[in-house]
Amino acid sequence: MSENPQEPQAPQQPGPAPQQPQDGPAYGTPQPAQSPYQGPPQAGQPYGQQYQPPPLTPSDERLWTVLAQVGPFILSFIPPLVIWLVLKDRSQFVEQEAKESLNFQITLVIAQIAAWIITGITFGIGGIVFLAFIAAVVFMIMAAVANGKGAPYRYPVNIRFIK
């Protein structure tokens, strides 16, 4: 050791030598390539923009449109309403067909109220008006078959409340 005043030397500390990392970093420490957050950011989407769900595949579009046409057999206008509200941003085809089904179901509710009023006024003779609902069932089945093939369907008798 030379005693050169221009070159200061660090004093040596006695103790154990620093350990090299074994197979990886300690548990719980984030990796340089990993984010501590759960989901990866969307490619090409800067922070602060609204999340856009991915579009539906053609088979999913057909499934949801058929459900919008057949669901009213059990729950009236509720299935097309829910499908339209939830999936309208993901597929234009689903939006169009769910709106068509919803409009038809609203038309049927109005027709059913009118049929009940006519039946009540005519003391039951007007009950024959309910036979018209057989045509509604046929239209709903035709719409489901057309949507299952991926084709749009327009009901022949429909008041379009929602455009």
Image: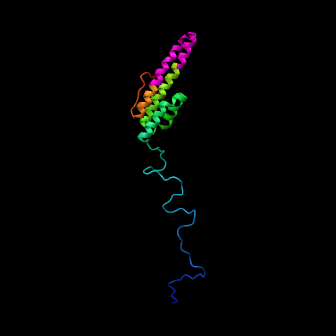
Q: Would you place residue 55 above or below residue 162 in this image?
A: below
Q: In this view, which residue lies farthest toward the right? A: 15
Residue nearer the viewer, 85 or 51: 85
In the rendered view, tell whether residue 118 sits above or below residue 54: above
Residue, x 56% and y 16% (percent of image)?
116
Where is residue 28 shown, x and y percent of the image?
A: 57, 62
Residue 132 at least partly seen? yes
* Residue situated in front as seen by the camera: 38 or 4: 38
Q: What is the residue that sits farthest to the bottom in this orientation? A: 2
Q: Is residue 88 visible?
A: no
Look at the image and tell me in which quarter the C terminus lies: top left
Is 83 located above or below residue 113 in the figure? below
Residue at x 53% of width, y 53% of height: 38
Is residue 97 part of the magenta span, yes or no? no
Q: Residue at x 46, y 50 (%)?
A: 42
Say left or right for 86 vs 150.
right
Q: Which residues are magenta?
A: 112-138
